[in-house]
Amino acid sequence: MSSKSLRFLIFSGSRSKLLLRPASPRCGVLRCPGGEFVAGGWSLRLCCRLHHTASTTDGSKTKVPQSPTWEPVSESQLPPVTRVSPDLVDRLERLALVDFRNQEGVARLEKAIRFADQLHVVDTEGVEPMDSVLEDRQLYLQQDCVREGNCAEQLLRTSRRTVEEYFVAPPGNIPLPERDERSSLLKNSEL
Amino acid sequence: MLGLTLREVSLALREGKVSPTELCQRCLHFIRKTKFLNAYVTVTEEIALKQAEQAEKRFLKGETLGPLDGIPIAVKDNFSTASIQTTCASQMLKGYIPPFNATVVQKLLDQGAVLMGKTNLDEFAMGSGSTDTIFGPVRNPWGYSRQYQERCAQNPEDTKDSSDWLITGGSSGGSAASVASLTCFASLGSDTGGSTRNPAAYCGVVGLKPTYGLLSRHGLIPLVNSMDVPGILTRSVHDAATVLGVLGGHDPKDSTTVPEPFKPFSLPDEIDVRNVCVGIPREYHAPGLSKEILAHWTKAAELFEKAGARVVEVSLPHTQHSIVCYHVLCTAEVASNMARFDGLEYGHRSTIDSSTEVMYASTRHEGFNDVVRGRILSGNYFLLKQNYDRYFVKAQKVRRLIANDFMKVFSSGVDVLLTPTTLSDAARYSEFIKEDNRTRSAQEDIFTQCANMAGLPAVTLPIALSERNLPISLQFIGQGFREKNLLTVAKWYEQQVKFPLIEFQDVADHVSEFPKTTKSASAF
């Protein structure tokens, strides 16, 4: 292995992005195309340099790879960048009943989407999705008989508002207010 | 006394060298002295003393319940504990008192363990630093160890701000810190993407993630149903096996536990690794891996070879995609699991209640921090009809590829895999918070989440001190439901490296109260 000194970018912080491709088995270490990437984050201060010594203390060859084996990928292999529109913000806030709070929150979602975009470079032709690692086993079902219960009082105690044996909910069937009204309702919300 | 392993202190109790009450009191006293670590959310002093008293009666009668009788333990604050506040370090559940015990907690209590308290964590176990919690971040006890302090004194230029403490890692940072700071002998964490093994590595303790389906998740407030497992943190591999023996087994209340009967096992003290095949996955040399950890990883492989084990280089080709896949699946399941928090039946409830929708929205706005909300929103994005196939189903397919990678390697004759646990040793808090939670999680979980994706058991153990005199750890990943093999190999390696005990007890005397940081790490 020739000795080169390369710096690898790791993850999308505020600068460039982590772009990876499946390394084919047995491939050697590949060069970063087009020079260095900018590294972000403290762990990259200890960032790697390629070692050209691949031997152990007694001179025999070590099984531990002495240089990083990941391969960066260019932006062109990824789908186009997704921008989260105000309509999408509204839709997600309604579905999740959770608000973004400010523009920074939206920017973070865009970064999260970009990070997830790297999935698309993996070839999954003919692969079935996996729901659970225990898919080969039968799900255990309990016998349909009552073994414990009669603890309504205990359970009601955990709620903030109850009336007799009922949990109290505000009136339903009223749609969530529009965005502007929502942000004045929710403290510190700027969107 | 406090520095002993669980095995040693259990023997001391049985030999009458110390009584359960005395041991409990010493641990409680030390918890008070180490309050600056912020490892505990709730210290259950009265309950602990009562349990210790009952244990003492059993010891006097000679009717002990088992190896955990009278032993102080701590439990991460996302396990339900009856009549004891369970907060998940979130406003959403602050003051929530569950009416039942999680199955694994009940099993510990049934064995006579003495509950010291509930430990601090990242909010809803989302994070890798134990910094995003409403109770303030957890500090790594190693930052106050004599070993680290002496190193700082020798190199003042490396420690720009001596009051800048080290993170524990996360999300089970409080559990790891409680064991590492000698305030208890074992603790429960949870492991979804490495949340037990990451802080175990930074705090220099053993962190075991059992096979998915071996331990019951009933009572563990869920994060990712298909990956969560309760994790075990102890000071030695033998202790981890002891605790596993108590906790393993089918639970009718958790249908994802396998019905096969679980037999507790003990690990031999004399171990021969000549018939063991250790695999070194080449893809685990990720960019950013520190030189030190690489050197120790290399040395470990050498050591196994010299002892007669077969060490082979193997390939898990989809490793580098694992973290992206994990990100998508995790946020999608989180979006679903967090939907239960609406303020109606438990937890925080907003006073704004013009309609159910508004009440839900403002409850969740007030109750969740940025990290949690960010993951919920990302998850909802990936689950939108237009994105479902391209992201969620795609991630599920990649998950199968990752699980298949492991299957192929193990069926080729490999017994355990040897890998790093983290990219480097523990970071300073001021450095750690320079990036947001999601970025950090992607960096910290890089070696650990693959085992969660495939549901395999993994254990991390501290093996040496770094140049900064901080713990460095390596990870062993085993085949599903073969914890005995995995832990036997790990124990052998533990015996070779003889990791030093933290020199901490007298340091605690000299630490003055640090000003509490009110700001937690940024964002999601």
Image: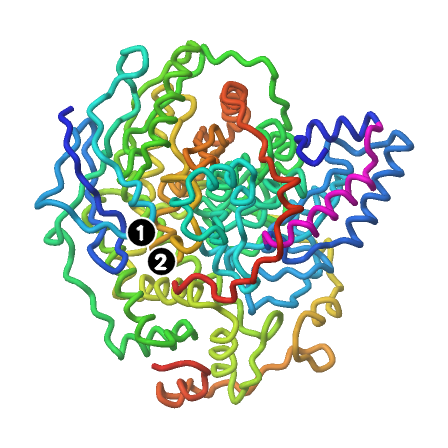
Q: Report x, y in % for residue A71.
A: 18, 40
Relative height, residue B416 to residue B349 (above, below): above
- Identity of the amino acid at label 2? Lys
Label 2 belongs to which residue? B434
Colouring of the image: rainbow
Q: Chain of mark 2?
A: B
Q: Which mark is residue B227?
A: none
Q: Nearer the viewer, residue B79 or B386?
A: B79
Q: Is residue B22 magenta?
A: yes
Left or right, residue B141 beside residue B293: right
Check the picture and name the quadrant holding the N terminus of chain B.
top right
Q: Chain of mark 1?
A: A
- Residue under the point 71% across and 61% down: B99
Mark 1 nearby-residue class (10 Å; few <14, some 14–19, many ≥20): many
Q: Is residue B196 magenta?
A: no
Q: Report x, y in % for residue B68.
A: 73, 35
At numbered mark 1, what does the secondary structure look like: helix, strand or loop? loop
Label 1 belongs to which residue? A41
- Identity of the amino acid at label 1? Gly
Which quadrant of the figure has residue A29? Answer: top left
Which quadrant of the figure has residue B89? Answer: bottom right
Residues tagged by mark 2 and mark 1 found on one chain of the structure = no
- Residue under the point 67% across and 41% down: B184
Which SS does the magenta portion mostly show? Answer: helix
- Residue under the point 82% across and 25% down: B15
Specify start and end residues of the magenta stretch as a single range.
B16-37
Labels in figure, total = 2
Can residue B140 be spotted in the picture? yes
Mark 2 and mark 1: Cα distance apart in space: 7 Å
| Labels 2 & 1 near each other (Cβ < 8 A) | yes
